[in-house]
Image (spheres, rainbow, N blue to C red):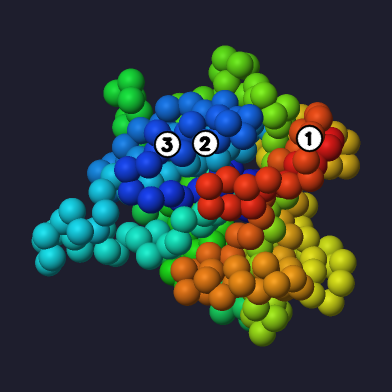
Amino acid sequence: MPNTKTLDHIVHLTPPGTVEQTSKQFQELGFRVLPGGIHADGLTENSLVVFADGVYLELISFTHPASHYPPGSPGRIKRDSHPWSSRSPGWIDFAFLGNGSRSESIAHIINQRGREEGSSLRYAVEQDGGRTRRDGQVLKWLISAPPINRRGLLPFFCGDVTSRSLRVPSEPPSNTEHASTARGIAFVRILVEEALYTQVSKELISVVGIPPIPMTPNESFWELDTYYEGVSAPNAAARLFLTTATTEAEVAFLATASEAGSGIYEVGFRVQSKKTEADTTPYGKISWVLG
C-alpha cells in the first residue's frame, strides 16, 4: 500500500510576474532560493526553497494577469479555470508525495477509504503535469487533487514520473543550507470554521490513513513523514495541525480564506537558532521552531 502521508511541498502564491521579487524577499528572511521554471501550461512560473528533510517551498506566480488574455480566448479560459486563479496571495496549497503511478492510483486508495469511512471524499484521477527548468530539463509528474472547494484544506498529491531529484534539487548540499538555519518543516497549520472542523477532520483521516492526535475539542494534529528521515530532532516529525480560529487575526483570516478556498494559516520551520518566534512572508505567517 503506498504511503499517503509524506509531506512533499507547500505552495506560496504572489501576484502575477513577481517570482523574482518574491525570491529576494524570501532571501531576506534567510532562505536560499533556487531557480524553478515555467510550468507546462505556460500559465505559472516558480522558484524553490529546498530543505534538508526533502520538503520544499514552491514560490509561484502566474506569468500574466487574467486581463492579459482576450476574453473568451483559449488562453483566458485556461487561466480562469486554473485551480489557483481566484486565490489570494499567501500560503494557498500543499502537496503530499504521490507514487507516479496510474495503475496503483493514490486517488483510488483515498476514495476507497472515503467510501468505507463515510467521509464522502473523492479525489480526481491522476492527471499529467510538468515543468521545464531554466536549464531546459523537462520534468513530468502525475497530480491527483481533492475537489476545488477543498484545495488548500486537503493536500493534492504530486507523484514523479521523471526523477524526483530533478524536481527537488537537494544536491549539492549547499542547496539546503539557509542563513535562517532552517532544516525542515515543523508544521503546517490549517484553520477551518468550527462548523467544518469535524467534516474536514474525517476527510483528512481518509487522506492520511490514520486518525489524528487530539489536543482540544477543536484542535488536533497528524504526524507526517518527510522524504528524508532522521534530519529533524528526535520525536520532532513534521505535523499537520487542524484548528479553529481563537484570535481576532485568525477570524479575520478565515473571512478572507473562505472566499479564496485556502485554509493554510501558518507554516513552521525547524531551525537550529532563532531571533523571533514568528515572522511574515509578503503574504503569510511563518514561525521558527527550535529543533
Q: Is residue 284 toward the left or the right of residue 186 in the image?
A: left
Query: Is residue 218 placed above or below 262 in the rendered structure?
Result: below
Question: In the image, what residue occupies the spot 62% across and 16% down?
Answer: 173
Instruction: Tell me the amino acid under the disc marked 1.
Output: Lys
Q: Which mark is residue 117?
A: none
- Give the distance between the C-alpha atoms of the residues marked 3 and 2, in whole angstroms: 6 Å
Where is residue 238 drawn, in percent x and y? 74, 46
Q: Secondary structure at mark 2?
A: helix
In which quadrant will I find the C terminus?
top right
Query: Is residue 52 placed above or below 243 in the rendered structure?
Result: above
Q: Which residue is mark 3?
A: 21
Instruction: Tell me the amino acid under the disc marked 3.
Output: Gln
- Give the distance between the C-alpha atoms of the residues marked 1 and 3, in whole angstroms: 24 Å
Q: Which residue is mark 1?
A: 275
Q: Which residue is mark 2?
A: 25
Front residue of 28/270: it is 28
Q: Secondary structure at mark 1?
A: loop
Where is residue 215 drawn, in percent x and y? 87, 67
Query: Is residue 27 placed above or below 100 in the rendered structure?
Result: above
Q: Is residue 81 toward the left or the right of residue 111 in the image?
A: left
Question: In the image, what residue occupies the spot 20% across and 59% down?
Answer: 67
Tell me if mark 1 has few (under 14), some (14-19) or many (20+) residues whose alpha carbon lies within 10 angstroms of its own.
few
Residue 212 placement: quadrant:
bottom right
Q: Is residue 45 toward the left or the right of residue 9 in the image?
A: left
- Give the distance between the C-alpha atoms of the residues marked 1 and 2, in whole angstroms: 17 Å
Q: Earlier in the sequence, mark 1 or mark 2?
A: 2
The answer to whether the residues at label 3 and label 2 have Cβ atoms under 8 Å apart is: yes
